[in-house]
Every structure is written in structure tokens, then in C-alpha cells.
Amino acid sequence: MEYRLLGGSGCAVSALALGALTFGNETSEAGSSAQLDRFVEAGGTLVDTADVYADTRSEEIIGRWLASRHGARETVVLATKARFPTDETPNGHGLSRRHLAAARDRPCLPGSRPWAPALVAVGERLAHR
């Protein structure tokens, strides 16, 4: 497996990522866990999900998998996305500090603390200062 640095973070991740869009919808939890196992066995470290994938079930499946696999929390870098609506409240979407912090701290990632996932804000351009 080839590895690259994730932006300016200094964190090395696999050049290939496993996308978890289907976890909890088209792919059962058992099938999702099997994919995650095979990906990590092949040297993969970057797993991509989002809070809107299967109404958070994708993240929940990954969280349970992380909690059940010894060493997975130290190996896997979880990239999750925020911005998209998660509820009907005024702060339930967008790139506000409040919404991004809520996305980062969601309790649906059991076993994922004390580290936070890589949080990817999509859909809007961020102004550089």
C-alpha cells in the first residue's frame, strides 16, 4: 500500500480510501465489517463516511467495528463530512462552528474517543485569512 500525508496535518494515510456510503443501506453490518477487515489487512488506513450516510448508520457501524477490533483506533483515520442537514434546526446544517463541532462530537461513533475523526467540510468554499 502506498501512503501519503493528509493535507498539512502530518498524518500519513493510505493512498486508497474505503468509502462507506453503502454501509447500513445496501451493505449489512456483517458485510461492512468484512470490507473494513479486508481493507485494513491490505494496508488501508483511510475510511470515508458522512453523518448523512444511511442516517448516521454508516458511522455507527464503523464505530462498533473500531471498538471491536484491537488496534483499529490507532491504525484507521476516519474522515467524516459535515455541512449537510442533520436536523431541521437553524444550526442543523452549514459550516458554522456549532454545526461542525456537533458533527465532530457526535455520540454515534462508539469507541472512537478520545481521538476525533478527520472532519471534512464540503459544499462551500472556505475563505482564507
Image: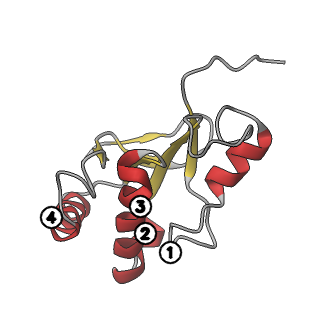
Left or right, 37 with respect to 96, comes to: left
Say which residue appears at 72% left-offset and 50% top-offset.
101
Task: Measuring from the top left, give residue 55's x and y in whole percent.
Answer: 42, 52
Label 3 – label 4 distance at C-alpha: 18 Å
Label 2 amino acid? Answer: Gly
Give yes or no for contact between labels 4 and 1 (Cβ–Cβ under 8 Å). Answer: no
Left or right, 73 with respect to 128, comes to: left
Crowd class of label 4 (few under 14; some 14 to 19; many from 20; radius 10 Å): few
Say which residue appears at 64% left-offset and 54% top-offset.
104
Residue 9: name its quadrant: top right
Task: Measuring from the top left, give residue 94's x and y in whole percent.
Answer: 66, 32
Q: Residue furthest front?
A: 88
Label 1 amino acid? Answer: Pro
Residue 63: name its quadrant: bottom left
Crowd class of label 3 (few under 14; some 14 to 19; many from 20; radius 10 Å): some
- Return the disc, 2 or 1, that comes first in the chain's sequence: 2
**Camera sees residue 40:** yes
Per the image, the residue denoted by label 2 is 63
Per the image, the residue denoted by label 1 is 110
Crowd class of label 1 (few under 14; some 14 to 19; many from 20; radius 10 Å): some
